[in-house]
Amino acid sequence: MRGGVMARRVLVCAATKWEAGPLSRRLSAVVLRTGMGPQRARAALSAVPAEDHYDLAVSAGFAGALQPGIAPGDVVMDVREAPAEWPPLSREIAQRLGVRLHFGRIMHSDKVLAAPSAKRCLGEKERACAVDMETEAVRAWARERGAEALAVRVVLDAVDDELPAELPQGEDFPALARYALSRPASLPGLIRLGMRQRRAIAVLGDFLAALLESL
């Protein structure tokens, strides 16, 4: 109970172990590791038992920026359908934690947008702030279950950052080793990306923990 109001039961959805693992250690909510992409996200959510009731489904994890001025480590929120009091509450929390927060549409993509030109084009066309691959599936599941939905993501790549054209297929050490050995020139960039991931997910974990505690 918070202030005499029953606390919401929250399901936080994150794609990979690098997102779900740190968030599960930081949050008191249930964290579901969905896998990357809409198909895996839908499959993971469909396996949630019907008798498990959730009041709020949160799409969390990494996103790519689609607009200039949104930097790695910034938090982006898509608050469509959210109660009116949530945006000002979120901004207060961000200011207290020293987190750069942006509100806007988080668009869907079936694949990682690696090229800056693709990100700029989508941002200009849709006037969106960020892109990911799982939020659409989380929102659809929430509607089916009669739950509220919220997308809270941390930016991993700025709009002008170029990602590798191909990402590792798998999250275990052998998959990462095969990827690095087949592309030795990409190893320094992969290490930098890994360091950026750790910093970014820590920012998101702190912000989400404070937000969910206040809802």
Image (spheres, rainbow, N blue to C red):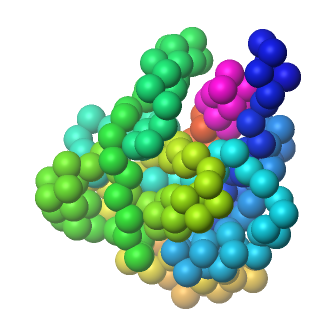
Give the residue displayed 59% in from the left and 64% down from the top: 144
- Which quadrant is the C terminus positioned in? top right
Residue 27 within the magenta-colored segment of the rendering: no
x and y percentages locating residue 89 in the rendered image: 53, 19
Of 178 and 8, the residue lying toward us: 8
**Res 120 → quadrant:** bottom left
Of 66 and 209, the residue lying toward us: 209
Give the residue displayed 69% in from the left and 31% down from the top: 212
Compared across the picture, whether 5 is left or right of 136 comes to right
x and y percentages locating residue 162 in the rendered image: 33, 62
Q: Is residue 65 above or below residue 206?
A: below
Compared across the picture, whether 59 is left or right of 1 comes to left
x and y percentages locating residue 32 in the rendered image: 75, 60
**Res 17 → quadrant:** bottom right
Q: Is residue 73 above or below residue 93?
A: below
Of 187 and 46, the residue lying toward us: 46
Q: What type of secondary structure mainly makes up the magenta span? A: helix
Compared across the picture, whether 93 is left or right of 189 comes to right
Q: Is residue 25 above or below residue 59?
A: above
Q: Is residue 27 above or below residue 177?
A: above
Give the residue displayed 81% in from the left and 15% down from the top: 4
Q: Which residues are magenta?
A: 205-215
- Which quadrant is the N terminus positioned in? top right
Residue 213 within the magenta-colored segment of the rendering: yes
